[in-house]
Image (cartoon, grey):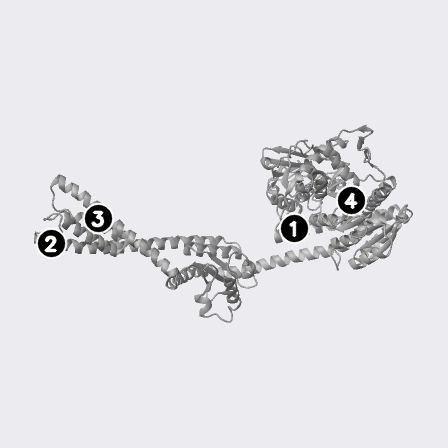
Amino acid sequence: MTQTSVLMTSLRAQALNFLLTLALVGAVTAGLYGIIRLTGLTHGSAVYLIPVLIAGTRWGIPTAVFAAVCGVLASAFFFFEPLYSFQIKDPHEVVNLVIFTFTAVVVGQLANRLKRQLELARQREIDLSDLYAFSRRLAVAFDVSDIQAAIEDHLASVMQRKVVLFGPQRDATSAAGHVGSGIPTPVLDMVDSMASGFDSVPGQAAATGTIVAGDSGDVWLVRAVSASRREFGVIAINLGRASPANQDALRARVDAVLADATATLDRLGISHAISEARMRAQTDQLREALIGSVSHELRTPLASILGAATVLGAAPALKDEKNLKALVQGVHDEAERLNGDIQNLLDASRISSDGVKPHLEWADPADILHSALRRCQRRLSERTLAIDLPQDLPLIHVDAVLVQQALVQIIDNAVKYSQEGTRITISAQALGDRLLISVNDEGAGLSEAEKATIFGRFVRGERLSATTSGSGLGLWIASAFVTANGGKLNAVSDGPGLGATLTVELPVTQTAVPQLESDADE
Amino acid sequence: MNDASPIVLVVDDEVQIRRFLRTGFELNGFVVHEAATGAEAIRGATLRPIDIVIVDLGLPDMDGSEVVERIRSWSNVPIIVLSVRSSEAQKVQVLEAGADDYVVKPFGMAELLARVRVALRRQSRASTGEPTVVVGPLTIDLAARAVTLNGQRLTLTPKEYRLLQVLAQHAGNVVTHQHLLKEVWGSIHVHDTHYLRIFVRKLRQKIEPNPDMPRILMTELGVGYRLAQMPTEGEAAWAEAGGERAKP
């Protein structure tokens, strides 16, 4: 049924080509007829080479021959004595026509061959530029998923078909991750068995691929990207409703493209790069997981220490024991500082392991700022605090908790790098489509070099590292949290010793603020 | 409720946490019962009269919000949960399940005691039908629907009053965004957080002596709002001694 319909479509296209050829010949005849009438010329049959050439280049040899025959018949009918009959009086003219027919057929064939070569050259050029784009993309690929995406896109663009690449087993990109993504289950099963059975059957099945029928009549080709390199994974290509003959042609094409691609991969040493990147990713994961679990394990006893210290500090037995109370307070403060550091490590591992996913909702910037100030109350108690907060700040669509944590880090930093009794000014303002929250201190300031590196991970001001404590994570976390909310964090300073201003810049989508219903306050 | 010595049930699987909570509560005149698991907690709460329950959300045998739900199904004893930071969604969930308030771990004893006292006070106000809520200079007379600031009568719009009323009914305890939106604007507006932001701003202009530095209507980011509890003198001393709220 599919094949018949394909056949019908191609027949219809052929018929159309013949009709067009006929129309061309008709047009030439009409033109010639007019010219001959006007000028009295008799030998115009060479003009019929035009439709022959056109048909030959466009639609192939049969139409070219057809054009030649039509041309001969038309000249015999319209231009050779006796007119309006296919008979020809002059035997010279007959020879003429035979020569013309022969020339027309040869020209048609030549034109057709030229066209094919042109097409091939064009296809080769596209392939080459694809391949070039592919290798350029590979050269800048950062990790395994980049490389796999590059292979996938390259194949899809060359094959003009849906192509899905699956990483080797036990990988985030293996078949299990694609369930429900529109790829038929039998195809996924085949991918799975091919990926897992790779070691035992490195032979033909994996290398040349297997046809799997998907749903809705589509067939998929499933095969290994490379017969010898497991790490390149397995691909599934949607061949559409191709006929068996067509399937073979497509398979040959896939073979050619994959041979090119794997050659490129080998040349660039991608195989090595893939295993290395995967190993690096695993090491990173392990490190983050370790930080995460160790920090968590540390927090539980810390909660007991902190809680117990507060109970001890207020115990009636210690009421008049100033020194003992100071000791307890010391335990409490140090435990609290440790807790802050652990919290930073947890935040940092959260940022690098799975990224920050903000939970966006409408928030009042003043609320966020007040909460941050409340959390920093004690640390701020030895600074003069000035707050400039306009009444009519726009609502912002952010994760309020993340923005607050960023502000706490920034305020903390301002306190850490400034002297007792100095002023810390916190101000907010709406500026066009942005909301700016600035924290200004009269502290150590920043040199040009420090400004460039201040938001890096584990970066600490070297001038002051001896006199201040910290992990160098605070502003890195702040910057990550602000960025996750679509904003950015800027640092401005007149120089070392001259204080610094850190500004959180957040987007305000004024028009998108949903309006209150008119009766909201009825 | 036993005025002389309230009974607290402490539910936490960490023995050291239970130990300092026991000492802290006993020093402040509470009688302490302990439970290490959710099942034990539910059994303990049914067997004995309990005035307040402290539940850690990370119990080994069941989810903290399940413990809250199970106790809530037959008792309106005040419940305060102990939660970790960065889990606002979990806090909201457990508050919706019926918990009265939460404290973020690690916490100081003063902070927990303040929350406990607020919850107990609210419980006794509910049972005696006391209609007036006082928060510093602000007085809300729920019976007369009258709000005064430093003795001056305030004019609030109906929605502003309703907002304040819901907060006052839970004075000192956190009220979630969802609860406020549902009570003031109705269930269909339960996700329209911006209504709340705008009305809280308006309300603060009227009830806060210094709206730039709110002391009465406090924000609990990502969770909700609370009317501040103004500590009595004894509690204030406690807070001094134990220091400010520990950095979560």
What chain letter is assigned to the residue under label 1?
A: A
Protein chain holding label 3: A
Q: Is residue A150 above or below residue A465?
A: below
Image coordinates for residue B87, horizontal then vertical, percent: 70, 49
Residues tagged by mark 4 and mark 3 found on one chain of the structure? no
- Which numbered disc, 4 or 2, marks the residue closer to the eye? 2
Disc 1 marks which residue? A348
- Left or right position of A269 against A280: left
Q: Position of residue B242 (x, y in %)?
A: 83, 45
**Which structural element holds mark 1?**
helix
| Along the viewing direction, whichever of A425 and B62 lies nearer the viewer | B62
Residue in the foreground of this view, choosing between A115 and B179: B179
Q: Residue furthest top?
A: B152
Label drawn at residue B245: 4
Kindly identify the amino acid type of the residue bearing the numbered disc 4: Arg
Q: Label 3 to label 1, Cα distance in Å? A: 77 Å
Nearer-N-terminus badge (3/2): 3
Left or right of residue A51, residue B193 in this image: right
Secondary structure of the residue carrying numbered label 4: loop
Question: Mark 4 near mark 2, Cβ–Cβ under 8 Å?
Answer: no
> Does label 2 lie on the same chain as label 3?
yes
Q: Which residue is denoted by mark 3 in the rendering?
A: A25
Q: Is residue A477 visible?
A: yes
Q: Residues within 10 Å of mark 3 (few under 14, many from 20)?
A: many
For disc 2, the marked residue is A94
Crowd rating for badge 2 (residues with CA inside 10 Å; few <14, some 14–19, many 20+)? some
Amino acid residing under circle 3: Val
Question: Label 2 sits on what residue type?
Answer: Val
Q: Which is nearer the N-term, disc 3 or disc 1?
A: 3
How far apart are the two marked residues, 3 and 2, measured between alpha carbons? Answer: 20 Å
Spot occupied by residue A148 in the image (x, y as percentages of width and height): 50, 57
